[in-house]
């Protein structure tokens, strides 16, 4: 008689499960934003159930606070042991922040959803984390006032942390880091920042607006505003109708549902941007001027409709797959025009390298737009300078910098960054 012994295999809980949950939450908040990052998706990313996640965190707001704290810790670590010279510090920090486990843009994109006290405390910790970069900028650019230092600081930090624009594996890590550092360095060399300043956070008030006379347009405008404020999943058709002053069957006469509204909003944005690209290409035979015009269009639309643009772009995941594909093509074609122009302006770049720089430039404009304060024309000008610096549009006149880190000034000229 054979004796069969049963072996019971018990799956042990990883000791770092809480850290794994925070990292997964950070990825979801970065990609989808607070409203549309779901507990179920975060739990699935870790390989657990929703109830298991709730043993560690009480809800999304607590998860967001933990994800922001993770980002701040990583930023602090990137600068903690960095060299004191600005160029060397940028190189060191870029290497740390472009790692596969680095969390980026969670704070900037989601801080409005933290409790006021938590938002204030996190903002102060983030400022302490980047303090070494601030000091390096102040030493290299004594000509800048506080507002100028703030702008250089957060623009260069945005370029360094980025959205892994070079993360598709088509550009070597060494080359990607070199391009990212050069982009951040170019931001640090911008001379005139005009009459703009940065707010302490990206949390702004709600702008007033005049509702269109057209009912269809009123519905669309109300929907975009609500998607930006609450997120797609939290908005119902009744909410949209109430905001537009239109209820009942009339609302559904124009749009059969939320997805149709979202498709209309995203398609309109892309059509408007693509129309400006066509105008820029038809208006000159100079690729530099054409790319400057395309950048100016992107900045103008962002300043006027940035919150709505960011929202509808983030909400694309909520569009049915069969309707999402043509929108993705529109987006790819739009970015592709930028890439083609940039490659003509800078023949040293491959298509993948140009694509990474375009993504970086657009990301910095998107992230800084919500924090700049000033007259719209001044804000547009400064965002254009930032985007142009990252793309290298001023590269032909930009001085090279020596490895010594020594500051060199020409007679009777404003202080300059150290040459290499």
Image: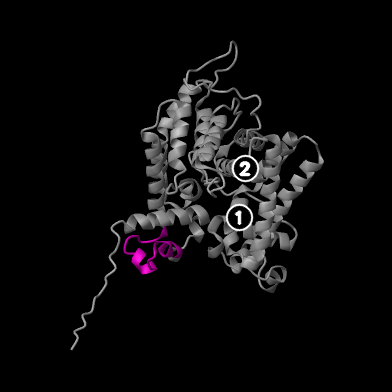
Q: Position of residue 294 (x, y in %)?
A: 71, 41
Q: Residue at x 66, y 26 (%)?
A: 396
Q: Position of residue 211 (x, y in %)?
A: 69, 56
Q: Quadrant of residue 362?
A: top right
Q: Secondary structure at mark 1?
A: helix
- Between 8 and 281, which is closer to the camera in this rendering? 8
Whether residue 183 appears in magenta in the rendering, the answer is no
Q: Is residue 269 visible?
A: no
Q: Position of residue 165 (x, y in %)?
A: 55, 46
Q: Neighbour class for label 2 at 10 Å: few (<14), some, many (≥20)?
A: many
**Mark 2 sits on what residue?**
358
Q: Residue at x 60, y 15 (%)?
A: 413
Residue 60 in the figure: left or right of residue 258:
left
Closer to viewer: mark 1 or mark 2: 2
- Between 72 and 161, which is closer to the camera in this rendering? 161
Q: Is residue 257 visible?
A: yes
**Mark 1 sits on what residue?**
313
State which region is magenta: 41-60
As drawn, the residue found furthest toward the top would be 411
Is 331 drawn above or below residue 198 in the view shown? below
Q: Residue at x 59, y 51 (%)?
A: 310
Q: Which mark is residue 209?
A: none
Residue 263 in the figure: left or right of residue 8:
right
């Amino acid at each position: 008689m054979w004796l069969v012994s049963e072996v019971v295999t018990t799956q042990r809980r990883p000791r770092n499960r809480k850290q794994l949950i925070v990292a997964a939450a950070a990825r979801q908040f970065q990609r989808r934003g607070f409203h549309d990052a779901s507990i179920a998706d975060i739990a699935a990313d870790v390989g657990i159930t929703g109830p298991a996640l709730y043993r560690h965190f009480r809800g999304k707001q607590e998860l967001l606070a933990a994800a922001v704290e993770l980002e701040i810790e990583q930023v602090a670590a990137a600068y903690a042991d960095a060299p004191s010279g600005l160029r060397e510090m940028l190189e060191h920090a870029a290497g740390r922040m472009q790692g596969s486990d680095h969390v980026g843009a969670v704070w900037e994109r989601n801080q409005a959803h933290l409790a006021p006290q938590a938002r204030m405390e996190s903002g102060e910790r983030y400022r302490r984390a980047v303090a070494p970069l601030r000091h390096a900028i102040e030493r290299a650019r004594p000509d800048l006032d506080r507002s100028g230092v703030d702008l250089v600081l957060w623009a260069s930090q945005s370029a360094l942390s980025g959205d892994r624009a070079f993360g598709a594996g088509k550009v070597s890590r060494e080359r990607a880091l070199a391009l990212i550092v050069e982009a951040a360095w170019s931001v640090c060399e911008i001379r005139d920042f005009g009459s703009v300043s940065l707010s302490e956070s990206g949390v702004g008030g709600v702008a007033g607006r005049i509702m269109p006379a057209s009912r269809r347009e009123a519905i669309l405008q109300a929907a975009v505003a609500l998607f930006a404020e609450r997120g797609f999943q939290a908005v119902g058709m009744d909410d949209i109708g109430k905001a537009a002053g239109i209820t009942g069957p009339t609302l559904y006469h124009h749009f059969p549902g939320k997805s149709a509204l979202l498709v209309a909003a995203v398609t309109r944005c892309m059509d408007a941007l693509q129309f400006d690209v066509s105008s820029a290409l038809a208006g000159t035979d100079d690729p530099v001027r054409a790319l400057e015009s395309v950048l100016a269009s992107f900045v103008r639309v962002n300043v006027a409709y940035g919150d709505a643009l960011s929202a509808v772009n983030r909400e694309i995941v909520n569009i049915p797959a069969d309707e999402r594909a043509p929108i993705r093509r529109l987006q790819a074609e739009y970015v592709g025009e930028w890439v083609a122009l940039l490659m003509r302006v800078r023949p040293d770049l491959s298509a993948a390298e140009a694509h990474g720089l375009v993504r970086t430039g657009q990301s910095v404009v998107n992230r800084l737009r919500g924090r700049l304060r000033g007259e719209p024309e001044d804000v547009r000008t400064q965002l254009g300078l930032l985007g142009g610096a990252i793309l290298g549009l001023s590269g032909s006149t930009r001085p090279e910098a020596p490895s010594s880190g020594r500051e060199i000034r020409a007679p009777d000229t404003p202080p300059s960054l150290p040459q290499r």
